[in-house]
Structure formats: structure tokens, C-alpha cells
Image (tube, grey):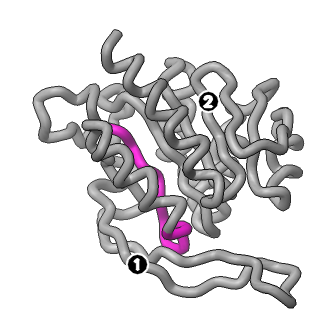
Amino acid sequence: MSTKPDTENSTSDILLVIGDASETVDTLYPYFRLQEAGFRPYVIAPEKRLHQMVLHEVRPGWTITKEWEGYQIMADAAFADIDPENYQGIFFSGGRAPEYIRYNTDLIRITQHFFSADKPVASVCHGVEIPAYADCVRGRNMTTVAKCRHELESAGGIFVDAPCVVDKNLVSGRTYLDSGSFVGAWIKLLETSRDA
């Protein structure tokens, strides 16, 4: 079964990939920016249900990321119910979720579609773990949080330490602190493809 958006113009529907422990700002900033730009964010996860987001930050005196509960967000559909042909772009949110959801075969199928079809793709922070596992980053320039550099390079990607990296249809940022740099660049790609 394939879930199809309930709008007449499906080219305005954009997939936002989340799971439990997706980072709150990584997720909500693009969610609302898409709406501002006239797109509909369509939240997908392993299951269609309410998911718990988290806040991630390295606090003074800490050498690792500390985590707190953030807001909750409802998934519009499960990965298994998505036909990616019906969507114009995809966003891979950060947080701890990508580490666990990247093994979902339906998510891999969806991810590979967007890369092979050259549709606009965006990734932030740990979101890189999904396209890396799907073997979609080979030879591509990307940025990510420093601790995920190994995942990117092990999958054949090229790490660039910058707040916004654009490589053809792929836009990436390091963390939520880069949202003001890379999300706008991705939305411009979406607008170009929508208006084409």
C-alpha cells in the first residue's frame, strides 16, 4: 500500500524523516520553513504514531553530547506506506534516530529513489547516517557533525567542514546551528524543481 498526499499538487509535498530521538531543532526548523515557502512537510517514521524528539547539546564541562526530552511530533505515515514518486524532496533530520532507523529496508528504498532521481535532498548532523548506509554518498561532498565524519568517509563521501555544502541535488549542514545557512539553500532547490 502506498500513501499518497491528500493535496492535488503532490509536487509540493516534502518528506521529513524522523524517529524517536530525532533532534528537535533539526526537525522543527525545516518543518516550519517548508510551510513558509509553500510546501507541505510530510513526516515519516518507522511507524505512524507520536514520536519523542530530543534536545542535543555539548554543555560546558562535557566532552560528549547531553540529551534532554524535546517536543513530540506525529508521523503522517510509516516508511512502508510511502511511494517516493509522489514527493518532491526529502530531509534527513539529526539526533540519535538515524543510527537506528537507517536499517529499515523501506527507508533505504525511499532514500535511494531521491538520489537516483536527482530530487532535492537535505541532511543535517546524524542524518548523514541514512544516505551513507543506503550507499548514496559515494563521491559526494557533504558536511555533518564531526563525530559522523567517519560514517560519511567510510561510505565513500567527501567531508567538507562548512555550515552549508551543496553538491548538485544534495544540501547538508553540520548541526542545528547551521540551519540558517543550509535549509534556505535546499528550499531554493525545491522551488526550482517545483517551478520547472
Residue that extends furthest to the top in the rendered view of this protein: 196
Is the Cβ of the residue at disc 2 closer than 8 Å to that at disc 1? no
Quarter location, residue 153: top right
Give residue 112's position: percent from left, percent from top: 56, 31
Where is mark 2, residue-wise? 170
Disc 1 marks a residue whose amino acid type is: Tyr
Q: Crowdedness of circle 2 by 10 Å Cα count: few (<14), some, many (20+)?
A: many
Which residue sits at x=71%, y=84%?
66
Q: Does the rendering let one see residue 1?
A: no
Q: Does the rendering let one see residue 149?
A: yes
Q: Which residues are magenta?
A: 14-24
Which of the marked residues, 2 or 1, is nearer the chain's N terminus?
1
Residue that extends furthest to the bottom in the rendered view of this protein: 61
Query: Who is closer to the viewer here, 164 or 20?
Result: 164
Left or right? Give the position of 43 relative to 182: left
Q: Crowdedness of circle 1 by 10 Å Cα count: few (<14), some, many (20+)?
A: few
Where is mark 1, residue-wise? 71
Location of residue 140 with respect to 63 vertically, above or below: above
Give residue 10's position: percent from left, percent from top: 23, 29
Disc 2 marks a residue whose amino acid type is: Leu
Give residue 41's position: percent from left, percent from top: 32, 47
Which residue sits at x=50%, y=38%?
184
Left or right? Give the position of 161 relative to 41: right
Determine whether the residue tagged by mark 2 lies in a helix, strand or loop: strand
Which residue sits at x=81%, y=86%?
60
Which residue sits at x=59%, y=41%?
182
